[in-house]
Amino acid sequence: MNDRKTALVLGAGGFIGTHLVTDLKRQGFWVRGVDIKHPEYSETDADEFIIADLSTEAGMAAAMDRIFDETYQLAADMGGAGYLFTGENDAQVMRNSSLINLQLLKALEHHQATKVFYASSACVYPEHNQMSSDSPTIAEDTVYPAAPDSDYGWEKLYAERLYLAHVRNSSLDARIARFHNIFGPMGAWDNGKEKVPAAICRKVAQATEGGSIDVWGDGKQTRSFLFIEDCLTAVRKLMDSNVGAPINIGSSEMVSINQLADKVISISGKSLTISHIEGPQGVRGRGSDNRLIEASLDWRPQVPLNDGLRTTYAWVDKMANID
Ligand code: NAD
């Protein structure tokens, strides 16, 4: 390890965590990754990988047995609309994720560690400001009065407050990102936790020529999607900045789910139609408001949506068609 800077990545077996570990290694960090499972779709690039349940005191003690220069907290129960918006997983989502954050704050205090990154979510924003598909209100300072549309969002908002309270009352130095639909290869694609880009890529990859794919609802609900590489650049900029307040990390380019599906179908080269079926949809419209991040970090997404989708589709297609 010598004089290399050290990083601890919690949730290093997940989608963003796997990519973050690789990125931190590229930056020269010595990295310990921790998760309850190994990455599912690739080897980890971490120097050391520990399997632990971070919601327990013993698990967190194994993960953080000493001080790290930077700690990244991404471990959470996470999923797409099919996992987060049905209500069936609410207790597990809230209990597991809050325990992880509480255990981490105790451990950070114990080791007098200061620099921590926390992955919050666009799901913290009030549902009533996202009822229209073309003009949602998602600026950072519109989060209160609080009214997230899911218990996942409420837990994220509570956790933001938990970190901010520790910043006020201790020497903790936190950076908090509200991620908006990050996508790319090596994310969940078929286990019930997949988010819309991976789900659509899978449906298209598995569809037979001339067939159709299912889209939940009328497909006119809008979202924005940020490719993983752009997300990692923003995280680095945020960590190197003095921006202590929660900040959006996402794309401001809103597309409807129908448009997203059309793009993936066109990338596949197949001739497919879209069939609309009942299913959980979440808010009507959401896209990142990037005025704050552009002004304070001079960051903008660089990867066009089509390019990110092409890379992701190629990966999902390979996964879906492995014999
Ligand atoms: P992910 O599900 O792929 O990764 C989360 C990881 O946390 C998983 O590998 C899981 O095993 C691990 N984990 C959960 N409970 C654990 C426990 N008790 N002990 C140890 N590990 C545990 O999700 P992701 O897409 O990589 O998201 C990373 C973070 O970013 C999460 O906090 C998520 O809420 C947040 N986020 C992601 C997005 C997105 O678009 N991907 C959007 C908003 C917020």
Image (cartoon, rainbow, N blue to C red):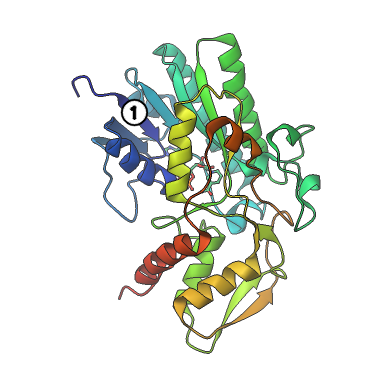
Where does label 1 land, which residue?
7
Q: Residue furthest bottom?
A: 210
Q: x and y percent of residue 19 in the render?
A: 37, 46
Question: In the rendered image, which quarter contains the N terminus?
Answer: top left
Q: Nearer the viewer, residue 151 or 218?
A: 218
For label 1, the SS is strand
How many numbered marks are there?
Answer: 1
Q: x and y percent of residue 312 in the render?
A: 43, 63
Q: Quadrant of residue 218?
A: bottom right
Left or right placement of residue 208 versus residue 155 in this view: left
Q: Is residue 112 visible?
A: yes
Q: Amino acid at mark 1?
A: Ala
Left or right placement of residue 105 versus residue 146 in this view: left
Whether residue 68 is situated above or below residue 186 in the rendered picture: above
Whether residue 253 is situated above or below residue 64 in the rendered picture: below
Q: Residue at x 41, y 46 (%)?
A: 14
